Amino acid sequence: QVQLVQSGAEVKKPGASVKVSCKASGYTFTGYYMHWVRQAPGQGLEWMGWINPNSGGTNYAQKFQGRVTMTRDTSISTAYMELSRLRSDDTAVYYCARDPDSSGWTWGWFDPWGQGTLVTVSS
Amino acid sequence: QSVLTQPPSASGTPGQRVTISCSGSSSNIGSNYVYWYQQLPGTAPKLLIYRNNQRPSGVPDRFSGSKSGTSASLAISGLRSEDEADYYCAAWDDSLSGFVVFGGGTKLTVL
């Protein structure tokens, strides 16, 4: 079955960077776009951007441009999201989520989601 | 402030029918599909409705979606205690280079 397994929780200091991984299994990794979505404690969902695992092309939400980098390693079917210059308001659960559309584009829907990675930013 | 507008809360008693609204604009709901996600407490969101009104396999037919113009709604009939969760609408937005927008979420309480 299609599954996304993310790396474990992280605690970082303000100004540091964090890199979260998302290992895909059960499907052809390069055939589907991967998105990243975050959720601050008690808050709603916030889209961060996507990566095309085939080409490596990316599109980031305006809010995160300059601070976020999405990459992938096709040899191990893993996507990564790195967020730099962390602030306390970056404390959130970060999710990877696959777009199930196989048309070669993404329309931004998600199934399945990873289990989430809690990133805590605190001095 | 979310781009899509949902009521923050909704409630119903077991067996009742409840609806959750989602309002957007011409650049998102008005010109693209709407998706709904269910997030049970302490878990990752799960796809509930795709392309306005389609149910993934395994989602009960008690859940239904609809869209009209720049608004959409999720209906849950035969409400059950296990439906108590947060529900989010989402859509692609054609502005700029394209991005995903979410509603702020609706917390459904089963009384």
Image (spheres, rainbow, N blue to C red):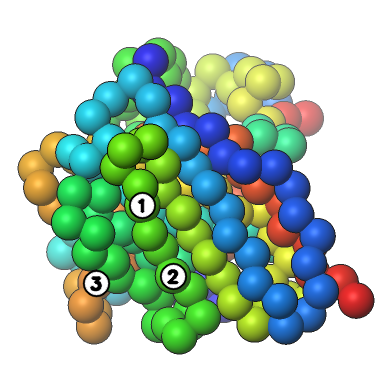
| Residue at the image point whose x is 77% and y is 30% from the top | B111
Q: How many marks?
A: 3
Q: Amino acid at mark 1?
A: Arg
The image's mark for residue A82 is none
Q: Amino acid at mark 3?
A: Gly
Viewer-proximal residue among A28 and B92: A28
Q: Give the image location of residue A46, x and y in percent.
A: 52, 64
Of discs 3 and 1, which sits in the foreground?
1
| Residue at the image point whose x is 70% and y is 20% from the top | B81
- Quadrant of the image containing the C terminus of chain A: bottom right
- Quadrant of the image containing the N terminus of chain A: top left
Q: Give the image location of residue B37, x and y in percent.
A: 47, 41
Chain letter behind tag 2: A
Chain letter behind tag 1: A
Identify the residue position indicated by label 1 in the image.
Answer: A72
Task: State the SS at label 2.
Answer: strand
Q: Give the image location of residue B51, x and y in percent.
A: 23, 41
Q: Give the image location of residue B67, x and y in percent.
A: 26, 49
Viewer-proximal residue among A71 and B23: A71
Identify the residue position indicated by label 2 in the image.
Answer: A69
| Residue at the image point whose x is 49% and y is 42% from the top | A22
- Categorize mark 3 by other alpha carbons within 10 Å: few (<14), some (14-19), many (20+): some
